[in-house]
Amino acid sequence: MSELFGPSPSTSGPDMVQLLTPEGQRVECADYRFEPPAGADGSVDEAEVVRGFYRDMVLTRRFDVEATALQRHGELGLWAQLLGQEAAQIGAGRALRPQDYVFPTYREHGVAWCRGVDPLRLLGLFRGVDQGGWDPAANNFALYTIVIGAQTLHATGYAMGMQRDGVVGSGDPTRDAAVLAHFGDGASSQGDVNEAFVFAASYNAPVVFFCQNNQWAISEPIERQTRIPLYKRAEGFGFPGVRVDGNDVLATYAVVQAALQRAREGGGPTLVEAYTYRMGAHTTTDDPTRYRLSDEVEAWKLKDPIARVEAYLRRGGLATPDFFAAVEAEAEELGVRLREGTRALPEPDPVGLFDNVYSEMPEELAAQRDGYAAYLASFEGVAS
Amino acid sequence: MTAPLGAGSAPAKVTLAKALNAGLRKAMEDDPKVLLMGEDIGRLGGVFRITDGLQKDFGEDRVIDSPLAESGIVGTAVGLALRGYRPVVEIQFDGFVYPAYDQIVSQVAKMHYRSGGRLPMPVVIRIPFGGGIGAVEHHSESPEAQFAHTPGLKVVACSNPVDAYWMIQQAIASPDPVIFLEPKRLYHSDKAELDPSATPAPLFTSRVARRGSDVTLLAYGPTVKTSLAAAEAAAGEGKSVEVIDLRTLSPLDLGPVYDSVRRTGRAVVCHEAHVNLGLGAEVAARITEECFYSLEAPVLRVGGFDTPYPPAKAEEHFLPDLDRVLDAVDRSLAW
């Protein structure tokens, strides 16, 4: 079966872009080079950028671990873990420019981090105090979409809007923009994802479809979704597809950066399949021991996205012990802030549930609200 | 092609199809963010020619011939709306809206609520609805209750050229998503005089279409014409029927209905949709709550039977026609 489905979990495979091996060895790829942007002074400090990626990934993982613990303590109703997908998300998230726009699934905590969305806003959704408490316009990061794949069409439509706004192919790097559409291997079976491919191809929309193939859609393995490597589907729709080692933050950055740039220049859509692994459960309600072997998980642990960057930085003398200690301290601080912040999130106002169904509340809905408010008020002063 | 209607145009007699075309044109002239999307709406002008000539005048970027995928049309319209556009989507036939059902009820309807009011969703979804055109399966349905049942959507139905002209413009101007139902069998039938300089009634209001004192007959879309004809026939028999065109199905505007029923004591609701859990059920329940002591008879419903839409040669039996409406009126009066 391995020849049918591309690289097996134990090998990287020849058709997968990789720039940093699981052992932390820098390697080169003919088609994609790691070309980080210049800093404020115009010079490129590659080690500084990699240290930044490391910090992003460590803090994102800490965020994920804290959120999982908060769910276990009853502080969150649910949590969708990203454990193991840090490189895919940070690599993609850091390839974005401010004017680009992101459409996430419900697991893009690392991309949200890159966009500057307060993690507490994400926790509010999973605590159940709101359904998305961040302002999408503030960070060009749309609300989480829970229906699998629906957001890929929104991303395509948004990209069609960018075309009409003249921010594609103008040649101005501060102006030209693209959309990054997230989905997973399970969503690749959805009609909406396939329709998004058709529309994006038909209109040459500036959208990068970024599929994190984490091998599992709850209990269903990738073999249930596809009979060919997912990235190869793009050819059938008429645009390029590429598979990247999703546990390699440098390669993911390089590939997504190139795909976004192509889209910004008017080159149209690209499908990027980030080949990665869901180390944790689908969500905190899931029990993966019922459907997958621990051998598989152990094999993927050897390809951990953070460990390889740490090995690269340490071996090359590119980061000091103080750097690692400082990141760890920052993670500790983040943990405290998340634990305290989650418990302090304001509860929704019961009568507020009637708000924002429409821009203006219809009379009949206002009557329902007023009736419920009066009903609640009738209990005031009544001993329970 | 006849000269397009615009502000300052002289009153003219137009069909419902021409009135919609003129209303769409006016909305596109007034707001450059208004886009039309749908299957065959560009070069062809739509299978019913509602968008005839608009692509030629506004270009392919604003009148968009889409791939044949309804979820894709509505889903990309969501994205365009998030980018600041006001997409007006044409679903080619009522029975083809279901592939887009998830995008409509899970995304279009809930975006504003989910975002705490940050993300308006000014999308209009035009659906030619109802039967009576001798079509094959899936071309004659009345899915309005499925959308009226969904919080976050507004649902309206026009019944005549004048309303069509104004209501489509008002729906496009609405910050909330609107399901806009068009009675397809009336597209090219009756003409009405349209005065573009007139002041229209607000969109989410019902309208008394004919005054009467014995029984209140409620209708919308294609059954308004049937109901007015029934009222005329009843008048010949000495029965005075008040006809109200509901126009807005969500939210409902039942104030004028309650006023009427309190006078007549009797109400009949008429629609082409299946009666089971149709709009008539909700309207009947509310009339019963609000007008209980005024009622001389239970609120009666006349509509499509609880069967799938039948083959075209049998549709005259499925659709509520003048005689079935009169029968319901008579049963109410005889109660």
Image: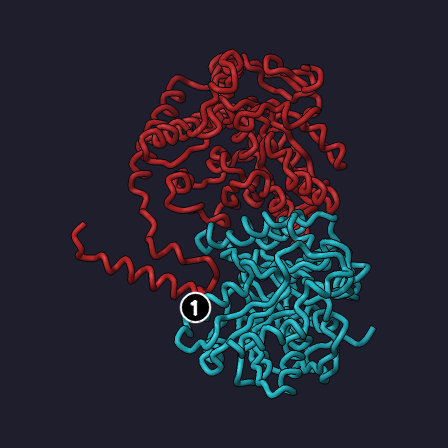
Chain colours: A red, B cyan
Q: Is residue B61 visible?
A: no
Tell me which amino acid carries mark 1.
Glu
Residue sitting at 50 percent across and 52 percent down?
A: B110
Residue sitting at 58 percent across and 61 percent down?
A: B275
Q: Is residue A162 above or below residue B193?
A: above
Q: Is residue A13 above or below residue A144?
A: above
Q: Is residue A293 above or below residue B263?
A: above
Residue A291: x and y in percent read 51, 20
Residue under numbered circle 1: A363
Residue B24: x and y in percent read 69, 68
Q: Nearer the viewer, residue B274 or A149?
A: B274
- Residue ranking furthest to the right: B1
Residue B173: x and y in percent read 58, 67
Residue sitting at 51 percent across and 63 percent down?
A: B281
Residue B218: x and y in percent read 56, 73
The quadrant in which residue B88 appears is bottom right
Bin the neighbour count of mark 1 within 10 Å (Cα to Cα): few under 14, some 14-19, many 20 and up. few
Left or right: A72 in relation to B33: left
Q: Nearer the viewer, residue A175 or A384?
A: A384
Chain at numbered mark 1:
A
